[in-house]
Image (cartoon, helix red, strand yellow):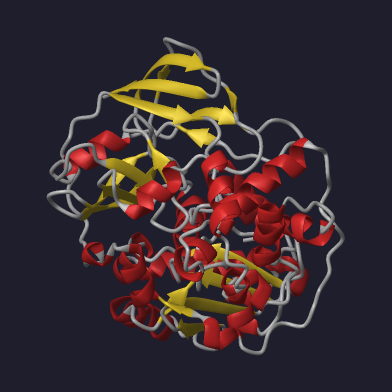
Amino acid sequence: MERRQIIERIRAAGVVGAGGGGFPTHVKVDARVDTVIANGAECEPLARVDKLLMAAEPQLVVRGLQLVMQACGARRGVLALKAKAGDSIAALEGVLRGRGLQEQIELYLLDDFYPAGDEFVLVRQVTGRVIPEFGLPLQVGVVVSNVTTLADVARAVDEGRPVSERVVAVLGEVRRQAAFTVPLGTPLELLVEAAGGAGVEGAQLLEGGPMMGRLARSRDVVTKTTSLLLVLPEQHPVVQRRLRSPERQLQLTRSACLKCMLCTEICPRNLLGHGLYPDRLMRNLAAGVSEDIDAFTGAWLCSECGLCAVYGCVMGLDPCAMNRLLKQKLAAAGLDRPPPRQRPERREGPLRQVPGRRLLARLAVRDYDVAVARQPFTPSLSRLVLPLRQHAGAAAVPVVEPGQEVAAGALLGEIPPDRLGARVHSPRAGRVLAVDGNMVTLEVE
């Protein structure tokens, strides 16, 4: 199969980065690189579904990696996952041996540290190359793709199947921690119901994990980037950190910052030699200083991994939130990113990697670090709400109307002309109830 045909089938199926970024995969793989890395590291400490996939369906991951290598003209393929994922390692090794692919594709085993799954960190670990500031992996000859995305690629190219469902792990204060395969557009409250319901009053839902996840509402729905739903008590520190207003964050910064530099010492981007200095930002905000332009524009480099707040700051401050706020203000003021400024990476970088087990303890979520299995999804579904923007870029343009009957896999939204985007398809057969803004509501059978 020719590379253009592979890319077109990926585009037609609406495949996007399933690891959280949601970047349209047909755009990412339309490149020429020497190395493709399958990211199975699962950056979030409690993430589970990629390990389940690699253990249960390793052939899909390997096939997807082969297809992306072919599309990119890459000679080297790497399956990168943590050394603790024994079942996944054994399953992938079996496929590579069985298909005689050891010369083309290798396993790279990572230590259990955070953020091992960050693509800047992963590329440095696997290849020794450092992605420049504001850069992309392809600038150093690499494409990185999440393993669930690669499985979607295999289904799209070999079977013509569009992306229509997700495996989502439900952890935390529920009666039965488990993983469920559900159609896109499923309300999050039904996932909690499938897990036996919340075990505490006033539970809060966190979509995406304790480090980088966002507080969600029960009526929010599963999208192409959903993989983890964490149910926590309202008073849990992970929840409370997200409930602080920007004004409160700034007040705490001005009153409590010790100017100790621990936030910078542990910053993954700073350790790679990027010009991000959270301590300077916090110091300037605390003192009301605005002349240190480099410190403020360095906020653009922040990946919002949260290590500075959760593990670095001894005063419980949140430099990550301050970076996020500053990026919004810089954008509103029309201030562009500065030119890339590469400095030598820090020699002590490997010594400052944060162990996953210690991070779980610091987050107070260690009790939720349990093995889960896929379970049947039993709640009845009568409606699905499909956002037309489940990806990076512009929302898809609706191609259906209220009252229209649609089949499973039917196209609901098309990529706007000359825009970055992805298609959206119907997970099940049914009838279109509403097309409202960037949402399509289906009554399903």
Residue closest to the eye, 364 or 430 = 364
In which quadrant of the rendered image does the N terminus lie? bottom right
Q: Is residue 242 left or right of 69 when viewed as pictured?
A: left
Residue 73 spot, x, y in % from top left: 70, 71
Residue closest to the eye, 371 or 113 = 113
In which quadrant of the rendered image does the C terminus lie? top left
Residue 435 spot, x, y in % from top left: 49, 16
**Residue 62 versus residue 225 in the image, above or below:** below
Residue 127 spot, x, y in % from top left: 64, 83
Q: Is residue 370 left or right of 90 when viewed as pictured?
A: left
Does residue 121 appear anywhere in the picture? yes
Residue closest to the eye, 253 or 141 = 253
Residue 26 spot, x, y in % from top left: 64, 51
Does residue 69 appear anywhere in the picture? no
Labels in figure, total = 0
Residue closest to the eye, 318 or 124 = 318
Q: Dividing the picture into quarters, in which one does residue 187 lie?
A: top left
